[in-house]
Image (cartoon, rainbow, N blue to C red):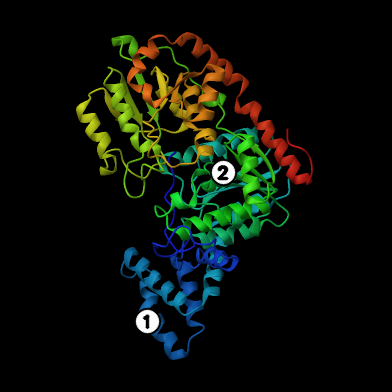
Amino acid sequence: MEQEAAPSGEVGHGEMTEQHPNRPAATARQVDAAYEAHFSDAGLTYCSADLAGKFLADVTARLSAHSADSVNRNFGPLLQGSAGPEAARMALRELAVLVNETGQAELFAEHDGRVIDAVFSDFVADVNEKRAGRGVVFVVHAPYFVILREAMYLRRNGYRVYLLSLGEVAAGLRELFRQHFDLVVDARGNYRLLRAILARLEPDIFHVQCWMWFGILGRMAMEAKKNAAVVCEFYDITSVYAAKEDLSPTWPPGVVEFEFAMERHIAHRADAVISRFPDWLVEEWGRNMGALPKYISMQAWPCAEFISYGKKKLSAADGVIRLVYAGGLVPENERNPAKLFPETNMDKAFQALLGQGMAIDVMHDPNAAKGIDDAFYGRYNRLAAEYPLFRFREGVSPDKLSDVLNGYDYGILLTEFDEDVVRISANQRKGAMATKIFAYLEAGLPVLVNAEYGEMARLVNEHGLGLAVHSRDLGNAAKILSKFDYRKAVANIKKFNESHSMESEIDRLIELYDAVISGHGEIK
C-alpha cells in the first residue's frame, strides 16, 4: 500500500539515525520528549504585519531599553514590509529562531492565541456553539476520501461536521471538501498551532484520521478533548504493516518506536477506533497493544452522489481491453524498498498486461505532490515510451472520477508480488482493503486485484465484483478475462452499490458515536 513518508528522527523527531532496530522500546520519558519536540518549531504561521508587530513588541518588552531599541531598529521596518514580503518573512524567521533559542516559548503561545483570535475565531465559535445536531471535528494531516464520504452522510443525518487539517488541503480538492463540511481550516503544517486550536474546541466528537506515521494526532486530540469523545480512524497500522526490524532502517528506529508508542496510547485511551481491517485482525492488534476500545470497520463505501455508470466503452471502437489504475504510483528507491512496498513492482504487472495487447491508463492521485512527468516516475515514463497503449492522465476529485472511469472495462490494483522479497506482515496481506476498489465500483467497473491480498480477494470473489488474479497468472490475464462473465459482474456491482452504500453503512458509525458519547453500549 502506498504510504506517507515519516518524519525522520530519533524517537520520532530530529536527525536520521542508524541505530540497531532491535533496541529496547522507548521509555515513557523518551516518548514524551519526542512528542513535545513536535511543538518546538519556531514557525510563526498566519503572521500578518500587525501580528508580527505585536510579536516584536512582546520580544522587546523583555529586553533592556538599549537592546529593545536595537531590535526594533533591526526588525521593525522589515516586519512592516519596507524591503518587500520575502525580506519580511526572512526577518520574521530570524526573530522567531532568536526567541526560540533564548527559551521564551511562552511568546509563541501568546502569538498563536492572537492568530486564533484573528483567523480561526469563526471556526472555534461555530464548533463550540451549542445547538441542534452533534458537532464532529475531523482532525487530519491531509484529508482523504473515507472521511469525506463519512462527513457527507453524517451531515445528512443532522450532524455538524468540521475539518481541521494540519497541512493545507490540495488545491484541486479544496472546493469539494468545503462543499461537504460546515467549515474547513488548516494549520499550514504547524503542530504547535494545531495544538493551540484543538485546545480551544469543544465538539461532541473528535474524529481523528490516524494514518501511518500520524498517530500523534490521536494523542493531541485526547489531550484537548475536555468532554468530547475521541474516535481514531486508521488506514494502515504501523505495527500491523510490518515488524519493527523490517521497518528499520527505511524509517529510523526512533520514528518507528514513537509511532508504536502512539498506537499504544490510542489503544489504551481512545474512546473508539475505526479501521479498514476485519474484526479478527483488530482484536489481535488490541491483544498486542494490551487494550482495545470499541471498534468498527469502515470502508470508502459507494456514495450515490459519485456513482456514474455511463453507456459507452472505449473498447467498443477497437476491441482493445481498456484497464485503468486510479491512484498513486510507488517508485522503488531508498525510501520505498520493494520489501515494504509490493507495489514497487506494479510496472512489471503493467508490462505483462500491455504485452497481451491491453491498454492501461493511470489516473494520477489528486493528493500527490509530484507531477506525472517527474523523474520520480521514471520507470513508468519508460513504459509509456515503449507501449503506446500506456498513458498517464491527470487525477480528478471523487465527485468527477466516475465520469472519467466509466468508459474503461476494468479497474485494476495489480502488482507482481515477489514472495521472496516482500516483508509486509501476513496480517497486512490478509486484511488490507484499498479504497480505490470502491471508486471503481462507483463507475460500474469490474475490479482486478491481486489474489495475494486476502480480504480484497474475498470481497471481489464473494460478491462477484471482478477477479482476484495471482501474480503468477498475470501473463495469462487475457485468456482468463475471455472467460469472464462481464455482464453478470456489472449487475453484481450495481446490486452491491445499493446494499453496501455509505447511506446505509453510516448507521454503524452513528451507532459507534452513540456508544462512546453515552459511555456504554454494544457495537453490532
Looking at the image, which residue is at 36% across and 71% down? 91
In what quadrant of the picture does the C terminus appear? top right
In the picture, measured across the screen, residue 173 lies left or right of residue 30, that is left
Q: Which residue appears at 66% of the width and 37% of the height?
A: 296
Residue 488, image x, y percentages: 50, 9
Q: Which mark is residue 73?
A: 1
How far is disc 2 from disc 1 in space, using C-alphas?
Answer: 50 Å
Q: Which residue is mark 2?
A: 234
* Rendered image quadrant of residue 154: top right
Q: Toward the viewer: 99 or 251? A: 251
Give how far across and how far down residue 107 sits, in percent. 53, 74
**Are the residues tagged 2 and 1 within 8 Å (C-beta)?**
no
Residue in view at x 51 percent, y 38 percent = 426
**Label 2 crowding class (10 Å Cα cut-off): few <14, some 14-19, many 20+?**
many
Q: What label sits on residue 481 in the rendered view?
A: none
Task: Name the amino acid, label 1.
Answer: Arg
Q: Nearer the viewer, residue 151 or 176?
A: 151
Q: Which amino acid is tagged 2? A: Phe
Left or right, 452 with reference to 287:
left
Q: Quadrant of residue 151?
A: top right
Question: Which one is earlier in the sequence, the residue at label 2 or at label 1?
Answer: 1
Which residue is drawn at the image coordinates 34% and 63% (left, top)? 85
Name the element at disc 2: strand
